Every structure is written in structure tokens, then in C-alpha cells.
Amino acid sequence: AQSVTQPDIHITVSEGASLELRCNYSYGATPYLFWYVQSPGQGLQLLLKYFSGDTLVQGIKGFEAEFKRSQSSFNLRKPSVHWSDAAEYFCAVGVRSNDYKLSFGAGTTVTVRA
Amino acid sequence: GAGVSQSPRYKVAKRGQDVALRCDPISGHVSLFWYQQALGQGPEFLTYFQNEAQLDKSGLPSDRFFAERPEGSVSTLKIQRTQQEDSAVYLCASSGQRGRTGTQYFGPGTRLTVL
């Protein structure tokens, strides 16, 4: 079965600084990959997704992620964070043979300091 | 509104009580998903509906959990004889397409606390 690891439980970043959130997956083939953001009291919102093609994916709110097959990673980046980016971020994996079931990582909480 | 809505937003139950959690998906969405999110964890898949058909219920943790979507729109997740370990946020998501290829739109969740 596929699994997702988000090594960083909590990251603190200064406003205006760059942000990178790590995601590693375990799966024998190329999975479908997603990043979601969850603000307090809100549902999960899709930031971006990768199915195939260009390994650098652009998403909403200025986020991007890069799929690296050799490292089984799908790290999320933002060049300059805003205070409103403080939230919890989840990486998720879907597999082609069971295409409706997403497996989520445990999440990374991002705190933005002024 | 145009998004997925869930009710109630918060539910406190005494151990042993039955609870029913409601999900109103985006109108016309074919696929509906339920997830359980324990504190400090990511969502865990519970079950999947395509229209009124429950195609996968492999994630339901016990036979105390039951989900239905009788008319292919609103769905209800029912938990019988609640236990403390059932305390979690229950998330509903819907998608306009079959399977995960469609973006899943999530509701705000129902936070269930079992005392």
C-alpha cells in the first residue's frame, strides 16, 4: 500500500522568506500527487496536483511543487510567504489502480512570524 | 452556497450514543467521500460513493459505522454506540468526476467529541 511521509511536523518562517515543505511517498509506480492546505475551521483546499507531464507544477496562491521520481518526493515551495499562509499543509497520494482513494500525510503546520 | 456543507459542525456525544453526520455535496457532483481526521493526523479514507452506490467502504473502522447516500446527493454517516476513540473530525468531500482524477472539494468537517 502507498504511504506518505511529511518529515516536518512544524515549520516557522518569517514573512517574506521562502518556504519549502517536504513530502516523500512510498509506492511502486508513479502515483498521483496532491498538496492541500487547511486553515483553522476550514475544509481542505487543493493547492496543486500532479498526474503526469511537466514535473514542476504551479498551483494557487503562488505555490509550486516539483515531482522528483528518483527521490520519491513532491516538495512544496513558495518564494515569499505571507502571514495568511499560516496553516496546516497536507501532501496526499493517489494510485492509478485504485483511483479514488487518497492517502494523506500527517501534515506540516506552518507558522509565519512578522 | 456553492461549496460542500456539513452539519452539525460540532457534536458532543456521550459514550454509547448514536450520532448522524450530514454532508451536502456540491450540486451535481457524482463522487462523494468520507474521511476521518484524528487530532494531529491527516485525513483517513472511510468510504466512497459514486451517485447512490457505495463502491468502497473498506476504511470504515468497525461495523458501528454506516454511511448512505440514498438519492445520490446528500449523504449521512452514522456511528452507533459511540466510543471515545471515535472522537475526530469527520470530513466529507465531493467531486464532479468519477475517481480521484476530479478535484475533491472538502467541507469544513464535523468535530465529534465522545465523552
Image (cartoon, coloured by chain):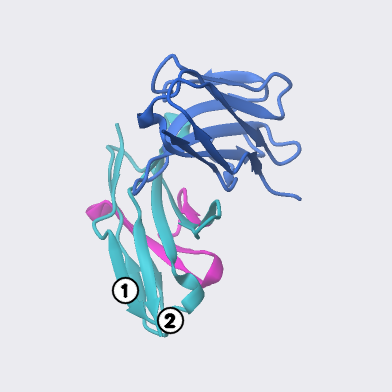
Q: Disc 1 residue type?
A: Thr
Q: Judge whether residue A63 is colored magenta.
A: yes
Question: Disc 1 marks which residue?
Answer: A12
For the residue labelled by badge 1, is the local secondary structure a helix, a strand or a loop?
strand
Output the letter for the chain in cyan: A
The spot of residue A78 in percent (x, y) is 42, 73
Residue at x 55% of width, y 55% of height: A42
Front residue (pair B51, A9):
A9
* Both marks 2 and 1 on one chain: yes
Front residue (pair B29, B64):
B64
Residue at x 38% of width, y 45% of height: B42
**N-term-proximal mark, 2 vs 1:** 1
Q: Is residue B28 visible?
A: yes
For the residue labelled by badge 2, is the local secondary structure a helix, a strand or a loop?
loop
User: Height in image: B37 above or below B83?
Assistant: below
The spot of residue A59 in percent (x, y) is 52, 64
Query: In the rendered structure, which segment of residues is drawn in magenta?
Result: A47-74
